[in-house]
Image: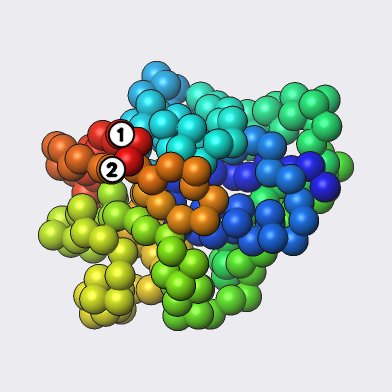
Amino acid sequence: MEVFASWSGGKESALATYKAILQGHRVSYLVNFITEDGERSRSHGIKADVLDLQAKAIGIPMVQVRTSWEDYEENFKRVVTELKEKGIEGGVFGDMDLEEHREWIERVCAELEIKPLLPLWGIEPGELLANFWSLGFKANVVATRLDEALLGKNLDEVLVAQIEKFNSHPCGESGEYHTFVTDGPIFKKSLKVTTGTRYKRDDVWFMDISAELG
């Protein structure tokens, strides 16, 4: 089946995309939602051009959609309707255990008459992370509501142990932290990341990054 992947640039979207490919689906587009000014991703605060370079490193075209949170569903439906005209039959989502997210995905996909694929659903956090690392994926923390000191760190066992000390979900499913993936089995070329300015917005610490092909 020809599908798109709902893309944040982080670990779950990357792993879900890989698993969908293993299941025999053809991921033809990465769909990423960015701020109304087109500067940054709506969820992770990553610069739009850095995400575009990530897509080039993977080798799958990216569709970036400007939206506010209030208009998110409307714009989601609009872009998926356009992709259906190009042959898309389903969408890949990286959700693993938040029931309200799954309900939204299933409702909206039913309205759009496409098939939702959630290849990570029900996987235990520890198993998911172990699978992520064993496959050779690499990622860095680019946003967190836990502690500014986590920004820029590699996602590894040591970091996850630190995150769990905050009584946080190990994968940050409630937005405790967000990552940017730089390498893995879906990448044709790895990315080298350079860290930049840190800033705080709405109780969340963000870190600007730039990237170049490795």
Q: How is the image coloured?
A: rainbow
**Residue 72 coordinates in the image, percent (x, y):** 57, 35
> Mark 2: which secondary structure?
strand
Residue at label 2? 192
Residue at 43 percent of width and 60 percent of height = 137
Say left or right for 132 vs 74. left
> Mark 1: which secondary structure?
strand
Given residues 199 and 19, the one toward you in this image is 19
Residue 104 appears anywhere in the view: no
> Compared to 20, does 111 lie above or below?
above
Q: In 3D space, how far apart are the residues under numbered discs 2 and 1 (Cα atoms)?
A: 5 Å
Say which quadrant the C terminus sits in.
top left
Residue 83 falls in which quadrant of the image? top right
Residue at label 1? 212
Say left or right for 31 vs 52. right
Residue type highlighted by circle 2: Lys
Residue type highlighted by circle 1: Glu
**Residue 95 coordinates in the image, percent (x, y):** 58, 61
